[in-house]
């Protein structure tokens, strides 16, 4: 799936066997990163997530979301759908809300934020704007 407008591109690749819910990825991306940001989202399984996390973060476990800024206005997110499904079940959330939570979280990492209260506050505002129940 590829959505284009005059300013940016967002590409979504699903490397899992399952279907993904339709979600407002482009609108949320534009809110957080701006319309000129080019984003690739890749949905993966635990094995690839674990390999990427080990290679780039030296952690030997799957990550729910990995963010890779590539250039000033370009980046890539990897969302582990198996981790998202497990977290949604564990926290009694809908899978689509967990995916959006991870997506928004990853966008703020692409924007340069680290885990802190400022990042959490900004994420909460975006979740509220797009009615993401967490």
Image (spheres, grey):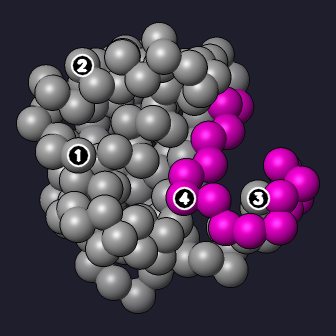
The residue closer to the viewer here, 74 or 99, is 99
Q: Residues within 10 Å of mark 3 (few under 14, many from 20)?
A: some
Badge 4 marks a residue whose secondary structure is loop
Residue 125's tag is 2
Sequence-wise, which precedes: disc 3 or disc 4?
3
Q: Residue at x 23, y 46 (%)?
A: 134
Badge 2 marks a residue whose secondary structure is helix
| Residue 9 falls left or right of residue 49 | left
Residue 32, percent from left and from top = 36, 20
Judging by the rendered image, the residue that carries numbered circle 3 is 53
Q: CA distance from mark 4 to mark 1?
A: 16 Å
Quarter containing the N terminus: bottom left
Judging by the rendered image, the residue that carries numbered circle 4 is 64
Residue 16, percent from left and from top = 46, 80
The residue closer to the viewer here, 55 or 74, is 55
Is residue 111 placed above or below 25 in the rendered structure? above
Residue 134's tag is 1
Q: Quadrant of residue 125?
A: top left
């Amino acid at each position: 799936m590829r959505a284009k407008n005059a300013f940016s591109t967002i590409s979504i690749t699903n490397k899992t066997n399952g279907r993904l819910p339709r979600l407002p990825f482009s609108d949320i991306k534009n809110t957080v990163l701006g319309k000129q940001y080019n984003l690739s989202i890749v949905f993966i399984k635990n094995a690839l997530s674990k390999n990427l996390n080990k290679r780039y973060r030296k952690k030997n476990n799957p990550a729910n979301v990995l963010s890779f800024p590539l250039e000033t206005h370009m980046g890539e997110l990897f969302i582990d759908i198996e981790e998202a499904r497990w977290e949604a079940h564990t926290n009694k959330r809908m899978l689509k809300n967990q995916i959006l939570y991870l997506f928004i979280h990853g966008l703020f990492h692409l924007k340069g934020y680290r885990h802190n209260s400022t990042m959490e506050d900004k994420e909460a505002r975006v979740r509220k704007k797009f009615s993401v129940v967490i």
